[in-house]
């Protein structure tokens, strides 16, 4: 009846129990608070069933923030372990637990933090930037979000029921095969990524269609804000790379469920094919994450330098070049596989070439700042931190692109330092900066500046303390995924500095939460009264803050690249045309139901509960069919209501 | 008027979105083809392609699918010209042909399985079953879709939404046809050394 599921699946050692209790406690706490405040109905009607891209965006960011805290806890435990586990001292984590923890850390940080922040920010601002009322397919957007949520829920369920994968964030076979990982950990990994990955794929389709079909009249592709370009290129990578992930995970699960021989070491299976396939998705994935961060910084640098972006065209070309090149470098993740000198040379050179368009972008940002009148607001300070850390990471990347050097660095702490350099110093800094930059547009008030400056300081110092020692350790020969080392190696002081660094990053995140709290308390003082707190350049700043649920009362038309900036400069009169009725999609719980069913299918396949898997699958199909027969239609907001609402907004602005 | 404008815009959005979806599916199949190509000769002492494929049988299967693609295409043209009863007949023909194709494929799978050649036997058979069955699952999804669509053609009038859904279905069905041509070539023709 319940497949492999029985009471042994519950956690038994103290650390695992602690994790499970904090997760259950947190969930019960939130549920109790909602019940006490009688907010369930509000949550359901206003948020969970909403098809408004801005609300979906906020939900993505809330989930990603919670997962960031979880991932940081894992990181702190890992570095705490390596700070003390030298010589006689074996630390507080068993090897198996340590392995589960770094696997969960990587999986959560990439799929549920970085991807979540990215899709969150895109949902918040992309339609506003394009002068559109919503994304192309609002319902699909809700399905995407809830699939992402279901994947996240599965990863966290593994804390309570069963275990998580101990095979690393990419689960290479044969280690991840049935023979060496007979437990449910790898299955949790497979199905949480499979479900969230399908959500990402659908988002990719949605955002490309939004950009190609929903731009305001007059906004040609080359007049599009550069962030929209970065999203377009990133989503092109999503729709071409994620199907490869779907297949790869599918084949691995067939090996584990049905006994096929794709990646086994016997009967003709080929484990190295898995490594090729997973990186054919994995390398583009890195660029999927970083390209929108480039777009965010391009907007920020232009806005806070009070200049138009230097080299818009070269920025677009660089984005496209990076997108194409990202497909022909995947082998640099395993130069040591033994593909031969010519193959390695090709992939090494291709990897070095990527540094050129990336360098173009860095110089374009710097030239945008040159002779600009720079306003050192928080997003701009994040940019300065980013340029420094990202350039260090870029250079160590070019070092490792030389196959001969890579043979020394492969799977060492040097590599760990390098990719954290790119992902924290590039992706995370970018998304935090974007969040601060667009926060007033969504919530109607700015974040506290001074606390924000301390946040940057803590993140930056913490980052350098945590990862510069890892570069040195890597050069000294420390491998990654090391939970204990000999005391005669003299590595411990470096590991201790690194652990202190993680502590400083945690302090930074604590300050961020404080900043959020203080800003909410002081929201009247920090109020954004005219919808344009930073003297912005693009269309999202032309609508009031917080942006109304229909985004624009009248759809704008565009004649310039920096449309809003030009309008302010030419003091153009506001659009005097009459208001029109606005059609918006009706809220629906179908997205939650479909994702819930998908999550149930995933859980059932992990535990071999076949009837539940069949039931969930049939349920998904039935919901989709029902939706195609009974069209929920749109709600129409009459012009008079829009006019009244806009006047009310205007009055609030004046007072 | 503005309503029809909105619905035209909507259908052009949906069509573009669906094209992009088809391209993602294309990459999904391309990955499976690549896997098949890599593992094709890894028979691990089990049968190779030429030992197990029954070419005349596969040819009939192929012709059924090609014919169903043809009837689906003509059905769309008929529906666009409001020839509902013709469209209905052609769609029923598509359904029958599609189901027959699927039945033949299942028969082939079961026969192989009963002869002791399952996906567990070798990497080659794993790749073969997965590639062909993925196509078969798509065909199954198409058949379910067609069953949902068909009742609309038992009325005297069809709306523009149904036409645009039939257009999408027809794109999907032709796409599966093209994928099958590749399967027929890469798996069966190249596999069969007697030809």
Image (cartoon, helix red, strand yellow):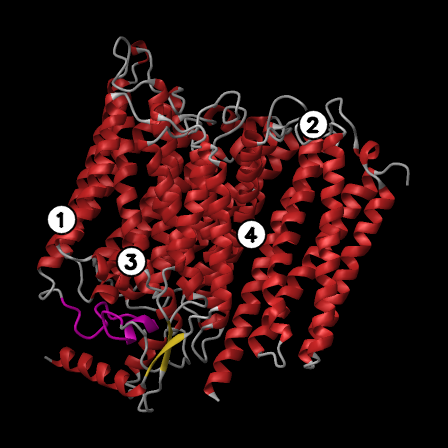
Quadrant of the rendered image containing residue A583: bottom left
- Secondary structure beneath dot 4 equals helix
Give, as a single range, the part of the protein colored magenta: A527-547
Local crowd size for mark 1, using a 10 Å CA cut-off: few (<14), some (14–19), many (≥20): some
Q: Chain of mark 4?
A: A
* Residue under label 1: A514
Tag nearer the camera, 4 or 2: 2
**Residue in the image at 53% along x and 69% along y:** B14
The reply to whether dot 4 and dot 2 touch (C-beta < 8 Å) is: no
- Secondary structure beneath dot 1 equals helix
Q: How far is disc 4 from disc 1 in space, using C-alphas?
A: 40 Å
Is residue B162 left or right of A435 when viewed as pictured? right
Q: Main secondary structure of the magenta part?
A: loop
Q: How far is disc 1 from disc 3 in space, using C-alphas?
A: 19 Å
- Asked if badges 4 and 1 are on one and the same chain, I answer yes
Is B59 in front, or is A152? B59
Residue A235 counted in the magenta span: no
- Count of residue discs: 4
């Amino acid at each position: 009846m319940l497949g492999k599921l029985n009471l042994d699946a519950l956690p038994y050692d103290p650390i695992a129990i602690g994790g499970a209790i904090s997760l259950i406690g947190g969930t019960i706490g939130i549920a109790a608070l909602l019940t006490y405040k009688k907010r369930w109905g509000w949550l359901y009607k206003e948020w969970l069933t909403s098809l408004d891209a801005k609300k979906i965006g906020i939900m993505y960011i809330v989930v990603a923030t919670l997962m960031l805290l979880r991932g940081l806890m894992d990181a702190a435990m890992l570095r705490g372990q390596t700070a003390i586990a030298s010589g006689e001292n074996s630390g507080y984590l068993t090897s198996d637990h340590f392995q589960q923890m770094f696997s969960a850390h990587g999986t959560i940080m990439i799929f549920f933090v970085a991807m979540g922040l990215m899709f969150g920010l895109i949902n918040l601002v992309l339609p506003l930037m394009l002068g559109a009322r919503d994304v192309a397919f609002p319902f699909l957007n809700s399905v995407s979000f809830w699939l992402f949520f279901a994947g996240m829920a599965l990863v966290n369920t593994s804390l309570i029921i069963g275990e998580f994968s101990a095979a690393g964030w990419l689960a290479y076979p044969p280690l991840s095969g049935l023979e060496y990982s007979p437990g449910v950990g790898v299955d949790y990994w497979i199905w949480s990524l499979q479900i969230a990955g399908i959500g990402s794929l659908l988002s990719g389709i949605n955002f490309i269609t939004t950009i190609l079909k929903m731009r305001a009249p007059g906004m040609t592709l080359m007049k599009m804000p550069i962030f929209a370009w970065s999203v377009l290129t990133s989503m092109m990578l999503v729709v071409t790379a994620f199907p490869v992930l779907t297949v790869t995970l599918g084949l691995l699960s067939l090996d584990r469920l049905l006994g096929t021989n794709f990646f086994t070491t016997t009967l003709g299976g080929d484990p190295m094919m898995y490594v090729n396939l997973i990186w054919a998705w994995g390398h583009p994935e890195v660029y999927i994450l970083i390209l929108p961060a480039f777009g965010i910084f391009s907007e920020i640098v232009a806005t806070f330098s009070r200049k138009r972006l230097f080299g818009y065209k070269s920025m677009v070309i660089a984005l496209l070049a990076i997108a194409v090149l990202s497909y022909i470098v995947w082998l640099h993740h395993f130069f040591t596989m033994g593909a031969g000198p010519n193959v390695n040379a090709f992939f090494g050179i291709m990897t070095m070439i990527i540094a050129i368009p990336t360098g173009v972008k860095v110089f374009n940002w710097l030239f945008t700042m040159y002779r600009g009148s720079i306003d050192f607001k928080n997003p701009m300070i994040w940019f300065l931190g980013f340029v420094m850390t990202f350039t260090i990471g870029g250079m160590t990347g070019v070092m490792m692109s030389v196959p001969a050097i890579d043979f020394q660095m492969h799977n060492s702490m040097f590599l760990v330092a390098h990719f954290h350099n790119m992902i924290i110093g590039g992706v995370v800094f970018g998304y935090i900066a974007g969040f601060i930059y667009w926060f007033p547009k969504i919530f109607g008030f700015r974040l506290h500046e001074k606390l924000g400056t301390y946040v940057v300081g803590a993140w930056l110092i913490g980052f350098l303390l945590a990862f510069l020692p890892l570069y040195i350790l890597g050069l000294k020969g420390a491998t990654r995924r090391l939970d204990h080392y000999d005391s005669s190696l003299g590595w411990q002081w470096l590991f201790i500095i690194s652990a202190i660094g993680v502590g400083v990053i945690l302090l930074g995140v604590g300050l961020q939460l404080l900043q959020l709290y203080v800003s909410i308390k002081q929201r009247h003082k920090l109020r954004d009264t005219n919808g344009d707190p930073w003297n912005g350049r693009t269309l999202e700043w032309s609508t009031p803050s917080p942006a109304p649920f229909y985004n624009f009362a009248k759809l704008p038309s565009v004649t310039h690249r920096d449309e809003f900036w030009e309008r302010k400069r030419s003091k153009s009169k506001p659009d005097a045309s009459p208001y029109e009725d606005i059609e918006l999609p009706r809220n629906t719980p179908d997205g939650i139901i479909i994702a819930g069913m998908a999550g149930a299918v995933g859980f059932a396949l992990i535990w071999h509960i076949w009837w539940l898997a069949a039931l969930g699958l049939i349920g998904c199909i039935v919901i989709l069919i029902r939706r195609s027969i009974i069209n929920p239609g749109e709600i129409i907001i009459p012009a008079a209501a829009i006019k009244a609402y806009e006047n009310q907004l205007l009055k609030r602005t004046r007072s | 008027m503005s309503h029809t404008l909105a619905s035209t815009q909507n259908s052009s959005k949906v069509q573009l979105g669906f094209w992009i979806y088809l391209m993602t599916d294309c990459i999904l199949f391309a990955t499976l083809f690549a896997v098949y190509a890599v593992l094709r000769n890894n028979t691990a002492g089990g049968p190779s392609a030429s030992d197990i494929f029954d070419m005349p049988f596969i040819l009939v299967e192929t012709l059924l699918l090609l014919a169903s693609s043809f009837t689906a295409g003509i059905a769309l043209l008929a529906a666009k010209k409001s020839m509902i009863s013709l469209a209905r007949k052609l769609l029923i023909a598509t359904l029958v042909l599609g189901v027959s194709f699927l039945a033949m494929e299942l028969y082939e799978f079961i026969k192989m399985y009963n002869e002791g050649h399952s996906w567990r036997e070798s990497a080659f058979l794993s790749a073969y079953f997965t590639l062909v069955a993925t196509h078969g699952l798509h065909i199954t999804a198409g058949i379910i879709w067609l069953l949902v669509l068909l009742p609309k053609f038992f009325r005297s009038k069809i709306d523009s939404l149904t036409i645009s859904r039939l257009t999408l279905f027809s794109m999907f069905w032709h796409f599966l046809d093209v994928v099958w041509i590749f399967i027929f070539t890469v798996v069966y023709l190249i596999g069969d050394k007697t030809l």
